[in-house]
Image: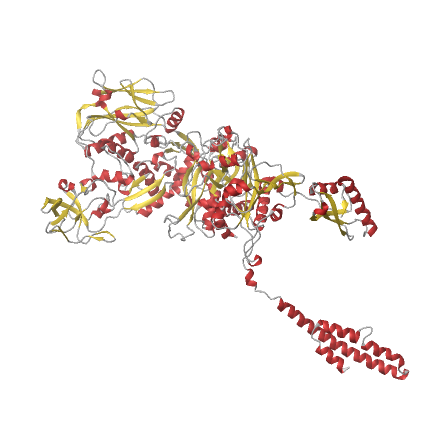
Amino acid sequence: MENLKDNILKADTLEALEGLRIEIFGKRGILSKEFIKLKDIPPQEKKAFAQNLNEQKEKLQSVFDDRYKEVKKIEIENILKSEKIDVSLYSNISNKASLHPVMETMDKIIDYFVSMNFAVESGPVVEDDFHNFEALNLPKYHPARDMQDTFFCGDGKLLRTHTSPVQIRTMKNSTPPIRMIAPGSVFRRDYDVTHTPMFHQIEGLVVDKKGVVSFANLKSILIDFLQYMFGDVEVRFRPSFFPFTEPSAEVDISCIFCEAKGCRICSHTGWLEVLGCGVVDPNVFDAVGYKDVSGYAFGLGIERFAMLLHRVPDLRTLFEGDIRLMEQFR
Amino acid sequence: MIVTKSWLSEYLDLDRISNDDIYRCLNSIGLEVDSIKDITIPKGVVVGEILSCSKHPNADKLNVCSINIGADEPVQIVCGAKNVVDAKFVAVATIGAKLGDDFEIKEAVLRDVDSFGMVCSSSELGLPELNDGIMILDDSIGELIVGKELSQYLTIADTIIEIELTANRGDCLSINGVARDLSVGLNRKLIPQEFKPKALENISIDDVAHIDMKDFLNADLSYSLVTGRDIETNLLIELRKAFVGIESKDRLDGLIKYSTHSTGVILRAYDASLFKNAKDRVEIELSSRESGIVEIIANDSVLSTLGVNQEPHSRAINITKKILIEASYIEPTLLVDAVSQKDYTTDEKYYNTSRGSEPELKLGIENILTLLEKNSNSTFLNGTIEVSSNRKKVSLNISNSDINNIIGMDIEKTQNIKILRNLGFEVNSAKADILNILVPHSRPDIKNIYDITEEIVRIIGIDNIPAKSFSFEEKMRLNSTSDKYRAKKEIRNRAISASFYETLSYIFANSDKLDKYGFERVEKELELLNPITQEFDALRTTMMTNLLDSVERNISYGKKSIALFEIGTIFDTKREEREVMSFVFSGNSTNENITNSGKPQTIDFAKFVEKLGAVIGNFELIPTTQTNALIHPYQSADIIIDGKVAGYLSKLHPNPKEDYDLFETFIAQIELDAILPKHINAHQISNFQGVYKDLSLVIDENISAKELMDTIKALNIEMLKDFYIVDIYQDEKLGSNKSISLRFYIQSMEKTLKDKDINKITSNLLKQLEEKFDASLR
């Protein structure tokens, strides 16, 4: 028996242990053979013999189980060791690409306004004069309506120069109260370092009963929105002029590049112009047949936001599918 | 609009107002400052009086001057400028003056003559170049005190402010106008403008000239007659013209432009002799067209259209003897409408007249006469002859509380009245809440309560209006557009996970490329009239050519695996818009890295389809019906989703591949609507064990996989839950046949299937396929 115990303790593979298990504990193993002897043992000794044999078996079983656990552990250890790799070899091998910074910025802006209970609206990119200009208080020959800026088609239609026509379409197709944004591409005949013939805007419009919507409300949401987009920035409103709003304002944020100390990007003013807004001009409401209402509207260029947020240096690369730019956003 | 601080000071007391104050105030009242620049004159540059000037003994082109610079003794300075001989007062850079970072004035010996300083030209002092040679000073810049630092003259060391004016603010297209607005913003009084020309002739203008007017004119005109003599403009005028960018070749024209820039009144100067009638009288015929346009006619010939243009030959210049000066005003809306209906050639004054020039004509006439008096020996006939439309001021009755509601802030009526009065509005308030307002003629843009509110807002300062959040009735505002945005976002995120970069390209395409590759074009009469460039001269009917351009660029940047997608609008021949999602994959199917030993496999049909599936979900493929020339005839397919063609995919045809010089490339275009999420109801799932069963069938090689699959599907075997092709085999022994291995998943909703149940199904299947395709088991 001591011999068997030594054999078990010497076994160092699961395979050898399995051999020993069959040899010792198997149906035809050593222990079975010993138990067979029982039938030849005189009855008075039987009990003691069987008891002894069972004790031996239990001891051996326990030695075997312990050894099995040990060897199993060693074997697993060995398997694990054999599977060792240099994990750092596999850094950065993802094939994931990235969203376009302009579209990603648009998503972020839409998320904000949807969470503020704005509806998202859309409209065609080929527009007519009424929706793009006339209804927005830009009568023909208005100085703000420069022929050079607009793409025209042979039938007199045009590519929308802003997302504002969606306001007009939405107002005509529904009734106040209105609370909407209109994201989309817009087109102007301009092509240089700071202009591309296509870019993206988001337009916002809120209309409610007369005397209800005020300039102070507009200020409130825009300050909140700009701080959501740019973090802890100061927001400045400057009176300005847009044909479709009055009073109108341009909105600046304190320069995020130089903390308003003045740098090249903010032309040393400490301020970055980011959007235009105002109280909806009554002529716009007249054009869609609304009476006794009040409202505000705002509009912003998404490329501008994307470039500021992600510090994209050149506007035109945004339209060239340049992977060198986009892979930075993976 | 460019103004200077010293020029503004002629209209407004700016004493102890800093540049920062001006910058802040202009911005806050809606006159956006583009730039603000101080002219700095170096220290040590002083007024010098030339006492004598003689030729340099050893150099023809040099002069030796003795100049009083306020020191005990005059200094000797050698000067190379020709015009020094005409000069009395000049700017002298004395010893030690620094005219630049590495340019300090030192004692010098020029051809054996000592020189103790430099007589400066304007550009050497950092001023605009005014003339050839040195800058000659005169007392237009202020009293000339010999030895006084030039930097003390604020007319020279001025501040130049460029304002970006919005289209509605024609009233600020002059120094006078900007000063008027600024006076309210800064709460400073305007300086009354008093011009009293002295050089009056004894004759009254009425004695020699008259206006012949046939119809009512909706315009104001005022005329003055001048006998021109020796017009020479002084330094201040030349300097300011240069500061604000007024260009003129003629001195009289320069003065006219200077005056308009100053007052905002539109002025023209005519050769008065053209107006002389048979009786030797100046006869100005004014005629009104139907559109309200006014023509100025002399002896039956139209010399000028009011606010629009002037015949070049009728212009008076500095040598014209008898000059007829005209000041005019016409309403901008009337003018703009009229001009747009006829093809008038407009001159540079139209920029001002179409935005609204200054209607206070007296100001303009008196200003130009005063300028002429100061800068020439001209004399003037007494008085003016005038035409006035007697236009009424716009009258508005506005409720103060309505103004406050628009702003969202309670402002006392008295404060609103004060602001409006300061801005030149006449305001009365008889009734408690109502303001009776008369709008000044200079503000044709003010028509209603919103315009008035805007005036109040900009003077109060938007920053002083407290933000107030808006309360509104809650309402469900999700709609199909917001659903679509959400779905698109999800699809786009899947696409980037499947290694496609999102791109944006222009909505334009190149017509030659569209033609070359067989894409349809928007019908000619619906097409773009004024494309931005030849490269983008058409509305796109596919975004594929733009994507291929991007691939080409990326290859040139050294990229080896280029996968792009774009969701955007394309047009059909009728210019109907629709949104599609396009894909392109070129070159390596993955990045080079350790897993592929730096040699990734090139993209192929199967890999492309798999990637596409990761984005748009399941689809079937059938041979394509597309005919464009990007399509590879043997590796292309229409994409079928829910039984409908939703787009196509293809290997790029070798011809375009060569044109663009690309790697192996695959393309796909899918209708966006076809891949938006759909509502799905779940089927009941069986709890009994199912079995997989493989069958290899030998069938004619011309039978497509789809045909086979559709046939099996049409058998509608209830227990056949799924089946798909796992292998295709072909060899010589099979001849014109092929072997297709199909895997079937068979499962019952009611029980665990036994072998005989399964065999029953497969043998039935086989039998049907035998009948249909002459198929046999391999």
> Observer-nearest residue: B186 or B77?
B77
Number of dots carrying numbers = 0
- Determine if residue B424 is in view: no
- Depth check, front residue: B534 or B114: B534
Task: Tell me if B697 is positioned left or right of B490 in this view.
Answer: right
Q: Residue B12, percent across and down?
A: 28, 40
Which residue appears farthest toward the front when viewing the image? B732
Q: Position of residue B149 (x, y in %)?
A: 19, 49
Q: On the rendered structure, is B366 left or right of A4? A: left
Where is residue B312 drawn, in percent x and y? 28, 26
Up the image or down, B688 lies above or below B371; here it is: below
- Placement of the N terminus of chain B among the 4 image quadrants: top left
Which residue appears farthest toward the top when viewing the image? Answer: B278
Q: Nearer the viewer, residue A291 or B44?
A: B44
Q: Residue A3 falls in which quadrant of the image? A: bottom right
| Residue B107 seen in render | yes
Q: Position of residue B576 (x, y in %)?
A: 56, 33
Quadrant in the picture for residue A247: top left
Residue A283 to residue B677: above or below: above
Rendering colour mode: secondary structure
